[in-house]
Image (tube, rainbow, N blue to C red):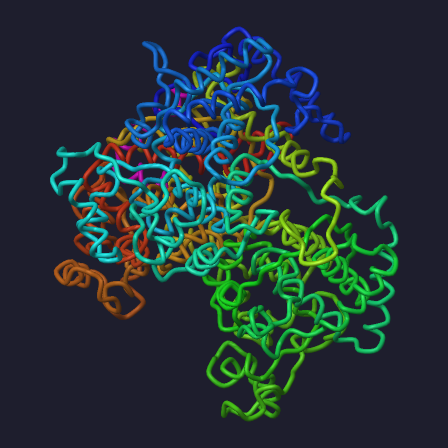
């Protein structure tokens, strides 16, 4: 959801079919806004019934405008014939549009005296073009079927036709979009990845759109066509070392080093063929000839190198003729636009091979009866396959003299087994329905059956995959989490596959069955302290310290029941009896401890989450391209389950977050804002630190169960709240101020405004009173009747966190790394206790010596009496909301370890620098982050209650 700039009221989400792509259709928008509640209810009922008419489909215009495709193609082909680079311009328009408010044609709207569009935002101004072509297409389509086809659909079809016209692959575009009546200037500035982005920032910006790191690398391949302006690549060709010297000199000749001179001079993004859609872009990256900094980041010694290499060598071909074109668009524009030529569903083989499930189950039951550990072996095969190129059966391919598969990669060599069982299943299925069922689907069904046979939960497996013709040895080595991984690395590797930290902990429960080799747990039992001593000694008896001796000796991953699928694995972790280092990391004082504990007490919760996560795994990078063998009829299709699920999620979320609005109290309590502001002004006038107290309360509340005022609840003999949790005890203050605010509001409109909304408004007013930016607070929350002591301990980032842990902690709340750096600027006000910065003063080297010396005067090395001594987080102006906090970081004067991590040679350095030079950029991003944080899991409707006293339940 996108919000307007501070102080600007957000328009209702009305959509229409514009008669002109540059002007919003206001009549239809107002009619829809007037009936929005009725429409949402109707859509929700339709979605729940599985009969939603609001889904995108390739047949949407079959009856209403069948001529739309010819009309679009004709104009696109003519435009590209006149100017070859126009194809790239149209693709860029589509990309920039989809990254702001979704694929809704908001980018096409012109500015007017009363309307600010997206065209003049930084990523678009001087860079996006081709609007006249879209106008021409719209005009042609209107002649064929007036008032039927949206500008958003025209742009999606035109992007596809541009790719095809320039030599890329073809696909069926799903249509049925409507046009936005709003645009977001700030959204364009914040959401579209700039050319200066590092890999972490790129990954974060794409993740914010629901796109994985794999999608990101594929989407970047659109730079195989088009040009870039000197202003976008000047810094890369003059200041950086990861660029070919000769290439840099060539580009410098057309791009002077001085800003302002030659800013708009152009150079091709693809050095060789800038008007042909193929994979030379990736070849350039490997040769250090990426034109933009953000391009070369994809091949710079990081996590995406192997994927770039695979595209360079043409390892994901989509051409049916076998010609050497990369099939990246069938991963990129499909991911961006929600287009796919096939979908997974549980009924895929209902007509073509209904006997597949019995055939698979029969072989699996026989195999597990012969050897109980075979169930774990098949489950591992499925996991290791899905983490490399997606769930495509690439792991099953044998090496040949001319082909290197994945079986001999480090995570697989000597560890994965059960191939003969999959062969037996494939033979059985071929007898029932030859040439129909893919090996990828067989593996997915067999993994489910393995879990069920060993006592675990069952679920309906979605099928319809096709088999890969390729494999990735490097991908297997890079993507499959090794047993030495720490929590941050595990989280990152799962996130790269589109799986959350919650999914990761649930899927790790697959280690409730199976065995591990000595080579994978040797270091844990000899070198680490977070392991039960008796278990370590027992395992040492079969796993000698010396490498090479006993490497392949086996031990059970689950100490008690290694052939039964239940929750004992988690019990082992709590007792420090995890066999692998990576297992014990899930319960080692970190963010996942609470989830592990919940599975110890509830096997049903584990089973439910394991099924959910397994279903998510099934969707990793689905392959709709060529088969290795036994081709599947491409005409087989499934109901649009993905679209339906998305609609359901949006609608169900809409019944919650959509009820938050800036006008929620317009009629029921219009005086709430004045009442809050009056108390906050008085409180801050009495004690300037109160502003920081209230802002911290809001942050600490939202990170536990969402923004629900759970933090405000007092402990009672029968109720444990969050106030005494480690991050809050002695640190969270200002409760008396919230009490005063609540009392004032109750005097104005009793029983109407929640404590959660009082806290959100008070946090905004605190920032404004201390000199910070203003924004319209969305309200309509209700108050929680519960609190989570463990959640407070686990979810609120401690001051000892490094950058990876901070990023992970914020990501768990749906906040990007960019949000994290902006929100950290809240530390421009307030104080911290000695106990929270002592280690940074005495143990870290990335701190200014003079600052450390001064702070040590009031914070002795020895823990104890001085723990609560205070020091300002912002060295210069601790009661004024400005950007000095970031200036401190650049000078190594961050007070907390976690603060200085934001500027310590990592992925966030550039963002910190940008806030040093631009307070307005900080203010804008801070507002965006606060609005997003305020949207975390609000209770609305009939959920929760409106507390009369914020400290206790009604």
Identity of the residue drawn at 54% across and 10% down: 142
Q: How many marks?
A: 0
Identity of the residue drawn at 75% across and 75% down: 373
Name the side, left or right, on which 555 lies relative to 727: right
Residue 749 appears in the rendering: no
Placement of 192 over or under 439, stated as above or below: above
Instruction: Give residue 365's quadrant in the image.
Output: bottom right
Which percent across, then down, holds residue 68?
59, 19
Residue 795 appears in the rendering: yes
Which percent across, then down, holds residue 541?
60, 92
Task: Decide which of 87, 228 is in the foreground and name it.
Answer: 87
Instruction: Give residue 468's quadrant in the image.
Output: bottom right
Position of the C terminus, as image quadrant, is top right
Q: Is residue 411 magenta?
A: no
Name the side, left or right, on which 871 lies relative to 426: left
Which percent across, then down, holds residue 110?
37, 15
Task: Decide which of 150, 183 is in the foreground and name it.
Answer: 150
Placement of 448 over or under 166, stated as above or below: below
Which percent across, then down, holds residue 126?
28, 27
Q: Magenta segment, which residues?
A: 673-696
Placement of 198 over or under 28, stated as above or below: below
Chief secondary structure of the magenta portion: helix
Name the side, left or right, on which 771 lies relative to 736: left
Instruction: Give residue 879's quadrant in the image.
Output: top left
């Amino acid at each position: 959801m996108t919000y307007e700039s501070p102080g600007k009221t957000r328009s209702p989400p009305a959509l229409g079919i514009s008669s002109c792509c540059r002007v919003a259709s206001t009549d239809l928008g107002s009619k829809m806004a007037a009936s929005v509640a009725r429409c949402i209810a109707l859509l929700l009922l339709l979605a729940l019934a599985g009969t939603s008419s609001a889904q995108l489909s390739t047949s949407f215009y079959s009856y209403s405008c069948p001529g739309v495709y010819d009309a679009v193609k004709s104009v696109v082909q003519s435009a590209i014939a006149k100017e070859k680079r126009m194809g790239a311009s149209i693709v860029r328009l589509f990309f920039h549009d989809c990254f702001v408010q979704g694929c809704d044609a908001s980018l096409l709207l012109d500015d007017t005296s009363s309307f600010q569009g997206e065209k003049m935002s930084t990523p678009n101004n001087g860079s996006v073009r081709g609007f006249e072509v879209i106008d021409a297409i719209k005009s042609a389509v209107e002649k064929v079927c007036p008032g039927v086809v949206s500008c958003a659909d025209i742009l999606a079809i035109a992007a596809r036709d541009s790719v095809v016209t320039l030599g890329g692959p073809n696909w069926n575009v799903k249509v049925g979009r409507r046009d936005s009546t709003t645009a977001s200037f700030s959204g364009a500035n914040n959401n579209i990845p700039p050319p200066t982005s590092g890999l972490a920032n790129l990954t974060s910006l794409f993740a914010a759109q629901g796109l994985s790191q794999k999608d990101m690398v594929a989407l970047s391949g659109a730079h195989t066509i088009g040009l870039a302006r000197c202003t976008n690549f000047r810094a890369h060709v003059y200041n950086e070392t990861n660029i070919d010297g000769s290439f840099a000199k060539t580009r410098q000749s057309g791009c002077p080093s001085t800003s302002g001179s030659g800013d708009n001079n152009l150079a091709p993004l693809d050095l060789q063929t800038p008007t042909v859609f193929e994979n030379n872009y990736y070849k350039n990256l490997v040769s250090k000839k990426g034109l933009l900094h953000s391009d070369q980041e994809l091949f710079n010694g990081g996590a995406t190198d192997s994927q770039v290499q695979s595209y360079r060598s043409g390892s994901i071909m989509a051409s049916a003729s076998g010609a050497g074109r990369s099939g990246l668009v069938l991963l990129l524009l499909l991911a961006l636009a929600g287009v796919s030529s096939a979908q997974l569903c549980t009924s895929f083989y209902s007509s073509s091979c209904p006997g597949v499930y019995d055939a698979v189950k029969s072989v699996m039951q026989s195999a597990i009866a012969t050897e109980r550990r075979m169930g774990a072996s098949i489950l591992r095969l499925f996991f290791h396959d899905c983490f490399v190129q997606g769930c495509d059966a690439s792991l099953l391919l044998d090496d040949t003299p001319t082909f290197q598969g994945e079986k001999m990669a480090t995570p697989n060599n000597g560890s994965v087994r059960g191939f003969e069982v999959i062969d037996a299943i494939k033979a059985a299925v071929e007898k029932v329905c030859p040439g129909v069922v893919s090996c990828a689907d067989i593996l997915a069904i067999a993994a489910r059956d393995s879990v069920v046979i060993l006592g675990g939960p069952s679920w309906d497996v979605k099928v319809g995959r096709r088999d890969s013709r390729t494999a990735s040895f490097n991908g297997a080595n890079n993507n499959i989490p090794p047993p030495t991984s720490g929590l941050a690395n595990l989280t990152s590797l799962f996130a790269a596959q589109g799986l959350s930290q919650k999914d990761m902990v649930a899927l790790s429960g697959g280690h409730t069955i199976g065995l591990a080799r000595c080579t994978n747990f040797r270091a844990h039992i000899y070198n680490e302290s977070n392991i039960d001593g008796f278990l370590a000694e027992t395992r040492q008896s079969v796993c000698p310290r010396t490498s090479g001796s006993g490497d392949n000796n086996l031990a059970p991953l689950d100490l008690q029941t290694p052939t039964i699928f239940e929750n004992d694995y988690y019990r082992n972790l709590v007792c420090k009896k995890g066999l692998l280092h990576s297992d014990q990391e899930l319960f080692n004082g970190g963010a996942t401890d609470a989830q592990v504990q919940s599975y110890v007490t509830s096997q049903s919760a584990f089973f439910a989450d394991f099924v959910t996560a397994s279903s998510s795994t099934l969707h990793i990078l689905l392959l709709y391209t060529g088969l290795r063998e036994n081709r599947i009829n491409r005409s087989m299709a499934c109901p649009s389950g993905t679209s339906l699920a998305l609609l359901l999620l949006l609608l169900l979320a809409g019944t919650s977050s959509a009820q938050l609005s800036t006008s929620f109290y317009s009629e029921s309590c219009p005086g709430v804002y004045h009442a809050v502001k009056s108390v906050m002004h008085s409180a801050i006038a009495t004690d300037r630190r109160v502003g920081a107290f209230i802002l911290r309360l809001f942050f600490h509340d939202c990170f536990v169960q969402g923004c629900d005022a759970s933090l405000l609840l007092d402990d009672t003999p029968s109720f444990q709240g969050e106030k005494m949790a480690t991050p809050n005890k002695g640190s969270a203050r200002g409760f008396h101020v919230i009490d005063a605010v609540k009392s004032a509001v109750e005097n104005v409109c009793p029983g109407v405004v929640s404590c959660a909304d009082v806290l959100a408004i008070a946090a905004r007013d605190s920032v404004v009173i201390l000199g910070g930016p203003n924004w319209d607070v969305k309200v309509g929350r209700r108050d929680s009747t519960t609190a989570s002591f463990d959640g407070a301990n686990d979810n609120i980032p401690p001051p000892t966190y490094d950058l990876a842990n901070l990023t992970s902690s914020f990501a768990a709340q749906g906040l990007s790394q960019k949000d994290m750096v902006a929100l950290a600027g809240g530390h421009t006000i307030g104080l911290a206790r000695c106990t929270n910065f002592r280690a940074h003063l005495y143990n870290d080297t990335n701190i200014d010596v003079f600052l450390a010396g001064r702070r040590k005067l009031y914070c002795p090395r020895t823990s104890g009496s001085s723990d609560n001594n205070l020091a300002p987080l912002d060295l210069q102006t601790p009661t004024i909301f400005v950007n000095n906090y970031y200036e401190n970081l650049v000078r190594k004067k961050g007070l907390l370890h976690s603060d200085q991590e934001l500027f310590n040679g990592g992925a966030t350095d550039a963002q910190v620098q940008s806030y040093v030079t631009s307070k307005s950029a900080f203010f804008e991003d801070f507002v965006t982050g606060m609005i997003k944080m305020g949207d975390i899991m609000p209770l609305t409707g009939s959920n929760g209650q409106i507390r009369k006293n914020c400290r206790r339940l009604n």
